[in-house]
Amino acid sequence: MGDRPIWEQIGSSFVQHYYQVFDTDRTQLGAIYTGESCLTWEGQQFQGKAAIVEKLSSLPFTKIAHSITAQDHQPTPDSCILSMVVGQLKADEDPIMGFHQIFLLKNINDAWVCTNDMFRLALHNFG
Amino acid sequence: MGDRPIWEQIGSSFVQHYYQVFDTDRTQLGAIYTGESCLTWEGQQFQGKAAIVEKLSSLPFTKIAHSITAQDHQPTPDSCILSMVVGQLKADDDQVLGFHQTFLLKSYSSAWVCTNEIFRLALHNL
């Protein structure tokens, strides 16, 4: 672990924590967001911890399991960390689907919070 | 167009420009990067305009076509614009593949440049 850049360590720790909480009890995800955090979930916009947690808590499935295929992390010029995750998920008894998610992390008062979060299922409609 | 937030206008203009240049002549993409830009391409890291353009120019295909399925844009606390693209691409005569790409845009001297970029094909090894 000591050889990886710090942004990779922080980014991958965050990602691991996020999906662990999401898959066990997503109502507990509030701590990672602030009042100014933005979430775009399948094209819908939500702002602030309360609205984000309400959206995630109200998603229409009981069981959810995420599997990460790949994750990438980069430092940004403003000392934030940009993380991108490509993976698959299974909700209840639905078929496995690919997903894509990105997080922008910022250090506020010595804690890394998520200021920006975007999620999309990897569904392509053939036109 | 006037009703969309400014970050959506800037983000979608950038995305449209990026894939148009990529698909016609990707050696010309240099203008959108700076000396500090970071690209992660399928897990490989590249830093700076020159290294990034060299990587993109050397990708082993002649023809390339991107099709955007969905794009999302958000403003960040540091006045940047974060954009996420989900789409499909076809290189030469290969099969169509899904891809995921992320761009972080920053305004320098009244121009929007890409400071961070991450690209991955949507391939899952079961």
Image (cartoon, coloured by chain):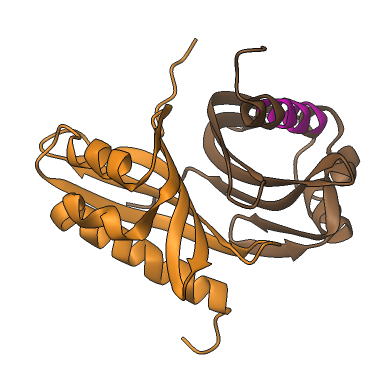
Chain colours: A orange, B brown
Task: Give percent across and percent down for residue A27.
Answer: 18, 50
From where the camera sits, is residue B64 visible? no
Q: Up-down: is A71 above or below A44?
A: below
Which image quarter: residue A113?
A: bottom left
In this rendering, position of residue B39 left or right of residue A44: right
Q: Up-down: is B124 above or below A125?
A: below
In this rendering, position of residue A62 left or right of residue B20: left
Which image quarter: residue A4?
A: bottom right
Q: Up-down: is A66 above or below A5?
A: above
Q: Is residue A47 magenta?
A: no
The number of numbered badges drawn on the structure is 0
Q: Up-down: is A111 above or below B65?
A: below
Residue range in magenta is: B12-21
Task: Give percent across and percent down for residue A74.
Answer: 61, 63
Task: Give percent across and percent down for residue A37.
Answer: 44, 47
Task: Give percent across and percent down for residue B92.
Answer: 70, 31
From where the camera sits, is residue A108 visible? yes
In this rendering, position of residue A107 left or right of residue B11: left
Quadrant in which the N terminus of chain B appears: top right
Residue at (83%, 27%) from the top-left corner? B24
Q: Please state which of residues B49 and A54 is positioned toward the viewer in this rendering.
A: A54
Residue at (85%, 55%) from the top-left corner? B34
Identify the residue at the far bottom of this view: A2
Which image quarter: residue B45?
A: bottom right
In this rendering, position of residue A52 left or right of residue B47: left
Residue at (15%, 32%) from the top-left corner? A60
Residue at (39%, 30%) from the top-left corner? A42
Q: Is residue B20 magenta?
A: yes
Q: What is the chief secondary structure element of the magenta stretch?
A: helix
